[in-house]
Image (cartoon, helix red, strand yellow):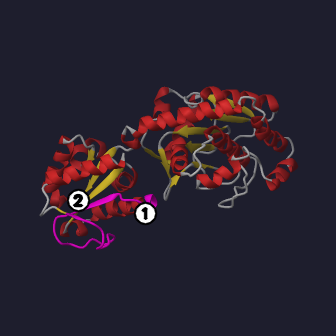
Amino acid sequence: MSYQIALVHLHLDFEQHLAELLRKWNATQNVVEFVGVRPSRRLEHSLLTPGAISDDEASRIAARIRTEAGYNADDGIIVFTEKRLFDDDFYQLFVGGREVDEDPPRVAVLSVQFMRRVYENAKNRDPRFFSAIVSNLLFSVGIDVGLADHGNETRGCVMDFCGFMSDIEIGLAKGPVFCEECTRILKSIPNIGPAVLALPETFKRINDIEDAERDVTKAILLRGQQYFADKEGFDYDVALSFSGSDREYAERLADQLRLNDIAVFYDRSEQWNLWGRNLQIHLAELYRIRARYCIVLVSTNYVTSRWTKVELEAALAREFEQGDTYILPVRLDDTELSGLLPTRAFVDARRESVESIVAMVKSKLTTQH
């Protein structure tokens, strides 16, 4: 973020509390001016609706928000998204930095969805979402003034860049704070260093901090419950992966899934959306993050198809990252599929009707909820 201007997206769920904090930060020091921004509905809709988004696309949206607000690339901006945020390898809580080749420059993105999900999985059931948000704001400011993140090392410092909320909570337990080493570095930086050092202290002096924590947490969890009822933010309940030579069966299955109100990705139904896209990139993203389950139609034709290799590789990556069932294999013949162990449970289409397979899918979806 910039030494002079720090733009902060005023998320609808915590706009009031965040705007008040920015006002207090500006009153505390006069080196960094924090400016709350409300994006146009068109751009904010892209961030605050469920689904998934790449770090590159989220960063481009942040840059457009900055431009529409009348600022330039020298002014840093941090935005929030309700989507699952992913880079080339993993889902992320936070992306941003000061790399020389960063494009667009001086942007940061925080996934509220990721933060909500890891809190749900944590043993600590007393989430402090507002503190977590402030900690990431301070992390972004710290990076810009030259502090290094601590990687996987947990010091209880806002510069901890941990991938697990249990580690982040170590710092949040006493409120966002800089460790001794970061404090020493900030004190040595003229003007900007002491100004940044004062920010977490200002946050801790907020009189109604517990009320703010409660309000922000309640709003974030409520939005999460609403999205959970909406396929947990996935675009599809099921994505079908199959060889074009097996299209007759795939189409019968897709039709039956739709008749049972199951949202299914079936390529021929979405020609309009696929038209003109780089299919290798789009399909890899779709099969990795955009569906709750992937049904793979295993056959001799499947193992020889170039496109199914792309789809299966993405699906296997998702299952590895998720650590839970994602791929639902359906046998059309006795072909062995590399990547799926023989010990995995298959459904055999030669023994089960399309209707019975769809019934099993419905049970899977219901059980997951």
**Closest to the observer, 279 or 8:** 8
Real-space CA distance between mark 1 and mark 2, rounded to the nearest whole angstrom: 21 Å
Quarter occupied by residue 241: bottom left
Q: Which residue is mark 2?
A: 242
At a point 19% along the width and 54% down the height, the residue shown is 357
Position of residue 31 relative to residue 86, above or below, is above
**What's the residue at 37%, 56% (across, down)?**
284
Q: Which of these two is toward me, 45 or 65?
A: 45
Q: Is residue 38 left or right of residue 19?
A: left
Residue type beneath disc 1? Phe
**Residue 344, percent across and down?**
30, 68
Q: Quadrant of the N terminus?
A: top right
Tell which tag, 1 or 2, sits nearer the viewer: 1
| SS category of the residue bearing label 2 | loop
The stretch of residues the image draws in magenta is: 321-347
Disc 1 marks which residue? 320
Give residue 13's position: percent from left, percent from top. Answer: 55, 30
Q: Amino acid at mark 2?
A: Phe
Quadrant location of the C terminus in the rendered image: top left
Based on the displayed image, in which of its 4 quarters is residue 192 positioned? top right
Q: Residues within 10 Å of mark 2 (few under 14, many from 20)?
A: many
- Circle 1 sits in a helix, a strand or a loop, which is it? helix
Residue 290 among those drawn in magenta = no
- Badge 1 vs badge 2, beta-carbon distance below 8 Å: no
Ranked by sequence position, the earlier of labels 1 and 2 is 2
Question: Could you say where residue 351 lies in the image, as x and y percent from the top left?
Answer: 12, 63
Specify the principal SS of the magenta part: loop
Q: Compared to 229, does 99 lie above or below?
A: below
Residue 113, percent across and down?
50, 43
